[in-house]
Amino acid sequence: MLHLRWRRWRVLALAPALLWLGAVSVYPLAVIVLQALRPGTSRSIRLFEAISDPHVVEALGRTARLVAIVVPIQLLVGVAVGTQIGLLQRGRTVVLVLVALPMFVPPIAIGLMWRFLLEPTRGPIASVSKSLFGLTVEGFSTTTSAFRNLALISIWQWSAFVAIVVAVAVATTPRSLLDQAFLDGLTPAARFRNVIWPRIRESALILLLVQTLETIRTFDLVYVLTQGGPGTATELLSFLVFERAFQFNDPAGAAGAVMMMWGISTTLMMVGLFVFRVRLSGRSTVYV
Amino acid sequence: MFTRTLYKTNVLLALALGCIPVLGSCNRASEGAEITVLYYAGVPLGQMMREEIPAFTRATGIRVTYRELPYDAIRQREIASITNRQGTYDVIFVDDVWMSEYARKGYLVPLDSFVTASKVDMNDFFESARRAEAELDGRIWLMPQRADVQVLFYRTDLFADPQHRRGFQQRFGRELRVPETWEEYREVATYFTDYGKTSGQVLWGSGETLKRPHFAFEFFAMRYWSMTGEQFFSDGGAPLFASPGGIRALEFMRSLAPVAAPGAANWAHDETVSAFSQGQLAMAPQWYDFYATLHGDTTLPIRNRFGVALVPGTRVGPDSVRRTPSIGGGSLGIAADSRKTQAAWRFIEHMTGPEFMARAALRGVIVPRRSSYADARVRQQNPAVDVYLQSLEMAWFRPRLVDYAEIEAMIGRAVSRGFVGEATPAAALQEAANEARSKLGTGGGM
Amino acid sequence: MFSIRERVSSAAGRMLLCAAVFWSVAPLGWFVIQSFKSRADALAVPPRVLFQPTLRNYIQLFGGTVPDDYTSSVTVGFPQALGLSFLIALLAATLAVVVGSPAGYLIARMRRRRWDLLGLILGTRMLPVVVVVMPILAMAIAASLTDSVLGLALVHGALGLPLVIVVVAVQPISVLERLREQASLDGVSVARQFAVLVVPALFPAVLAGAMLAFLSSWNEFFFALVLGGEQIRTAPVVLAGFQTLRGVQWGLVAAASTAMIVPVVLVVFLLTRPMVWRSMTRTWVPR
């Protein structure tokens, strides 16, 4: 007979995962921290210098604005669409695949595709918009449109991800529960609140956190589409980090901005976790 | 661990470089050697070199592994390989703006001894190409392979159209012709953009290429140099571009915003060229190399209806206009961590030699050797080659600084901000100048 | 029998789905169509709806040069790159699932410190890739794992691992655990409990996690560029190479993107057809 002694198996189950993750995150972080805190050479930039660097501070503001716009919409759209997909009886896989298509393509290709689509003088959207609505499409040529379109593409790209995760969670809802709720006379909204939402609540909150962190890291799109421009409209924190680390071959300079990113992300995460622990400690409802 | 290795490597390289001139003259066997070449992907010259490799191997016995990478990735890869002493690449592609960084940081093997030993005639290369792509601090670091220069593409049919000639004469009181000065350029652009708006045709007067960071910088540079007659930095490394002249140059760029095609603030080369090729632009300052693209494609709406001219300039005398197109291009160099420098040199010698380059010129490649243009057939392939040669004579090169990438990003950012009106030209340039001053100390000079 | 509210709600739901499908598919569908256009048709303004389809982009992508195309260069190795991408993504996903599912299940069972651990795991995704790349490159050089399938798969697997763990960890398992308790009391061995109860219950989540891990490796660019080299060039790297200084080779980009979608769609369809979805709609009845 196999006896599972939980403590030992717990270690065995968790240790490889944690070690592996640590190797690709803790070690590089340590390297970066060391570089950021190293005194003396004229090229090293320490943490407080990074904080006082106006470019970094402005980039922080832009990144925050992007997160504030993009993440709630991604979640809203993703939860709504994901719920609908999860509730489908037939053709669920087909719809899921179709909705998830943005995730099957590398971000570089997505960036290039949208660059072409939104091109103000020759892009298809501009042509259609001009002939049908008489509206011009600015693409990425003005500061406001560049930021707006960056947000739109980010939403387009990631709502699919949220939808998939939510759809999987909703799909595991036992049919009987929904049927029971329906028979009990609950409205569709109430059914969502009482049956579906408790099942996806954790996923949704995790997604909120994950997507916030992911949006803070937005880089591929900026790199392909605008390189931080026009002006500084899309100069996000991650782009600054890239510029300093890669194009200027100055990892020490990047380290400061990275520390800031990491500091903010860690703070957000701790706040988020605190909220989760508080809100999710009581799992009520009948339909579980 | 990583950074210690980096420092140790730099020290080692510095020492090693000191020894190389001595070692380079040693007889290092090149027969039967194998070298790795890294070039950037997507250009005809790369294709030609690849096709040439079998002939090269037959002639020298040296086997070649030819690798390509996208342009954006190639510099990182080269630097990572050399600083980690991996010895992966022997012959590397070096863009002219990287020359200062590579040479001064010890990423390259100086070629003087090789050039002397192989009796290469450096005078066959155009002087501007030599200065921009090969020589620095009195030594030869690279062999120039390709030299591009900025020119002005324009629509011959629009300039010849009687309706436009009349309209322009009425509005501006002078004849419609290819602009000689930047003020004339703006007038022509204004005329055609207004025509495009009123007639409902998809037409703009000019297409500007101002995406951050390279494009904004290089298309500002050709106006800045022309209007101020100065470089971006003094010999001592002090920034000169926030001067009244520089501010005027950026203000000129800002004044182009209403008459340039929309999208200018985020256009890279291919977007401008594409818009021009679809007949949407009356004029487009661009790199000469795109002439091959525009001339060779017979399906384009503008075929046989466009021409190439010298870029406009600034009037500095009754009969003289200061035109300052930028030169740009690439060269081949020997990586400092290469263990087969002799074989690497043989490859470079062959691929930048008069025979190969003459053949490349016949295929339309813009090579920097005088002798390659002697053949009359080159003109058949490349009808506008005289404009190219003329422009090359008057071309300026971009700042030769070790931290060129950073400088270009700073100034390009300022140009972009000034162009879209995020900041006044004066404020944007001042900010960039202050950053340049503080980040670079004494900088790298010319 | 169904009230107005029900009907409106379900109609609204259907409309939302249609809109969602259109919104996801339309831009990509356009791009796929672009891949079948000749260069002139692709760049034509206004966009050409009727055109003569051609396979020249695919021929160039998978074979050699197309004659008379002065902006082309020989595209080396896209088929190989596609194959490599697939292999590495498969390996990475497998590794992530093997290591991540037990961890995820364990965390799902935890009452205390659960969110601390999940937070830690998610935290590994906080650092921007561009900065983490260089230290990881140094490690890879030290371990001689550059330019190798295994090296890249290990890194990609690490990217997908948090996804697998989290997807499994958030599954509601209270019912499952009750069933397991019951089974234990009934004298069912742990191994059989796992085989009959746990695995089928968590299978959809594991599968979803596996697909997410597969996708994050499939689309990944930066590590592939830096850790790859001559032998290892994945599809995104080759695709990025179609941006030359002379311009973007749009035909090739469109064709390559289309070519990258197809295997993924096939894999997803194959994996989700049979057992998965059916098993989830069954009610929980102890066997």
Image: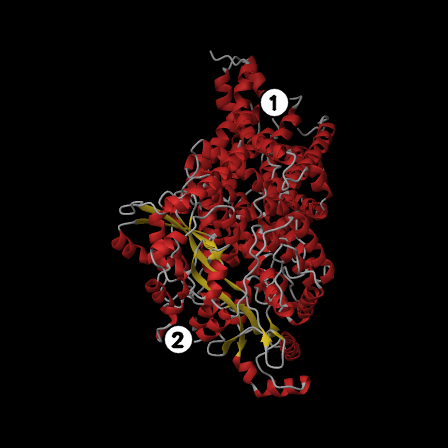
x then y, percent, for residue B308: 50, 75
Where residue C108 sits, quadrant-wise, is top right
Element carrying mark 2: helix
Please say if B376 is above or below B175.
Answer: above
In the image, what residue type sits under mark 2?
Arg
Q: Is residue A252 visible?
A: yes
Q: Is residue C251 above or below residue C213?
A: below
Residue C208 shows in this picture: no
Q: Chain of mark 2?
A: B
Estimate the x, y position of residue A144 in percent, counting from the top left: 70, 58
Q: Secondary structure at mark 1?
A: helix
Q: Which residue is mark 2?
A: B379
Tag shown at residue C204: none
Q: Is residue C55 left or right of residue C5?
A: left
A26 relative position to C94: left or right: right
Name the subunit of mark 1: C
**Residue B397, picture quadrant:** bottom right
Foreground mark, 1 or 2?
2
- The image position of residue B298, as x and y in percent, is 43, 73
Q: CA distance from mark 1 to mark 2?
A: 78 Å
| Residue beneath disc 1 | C109
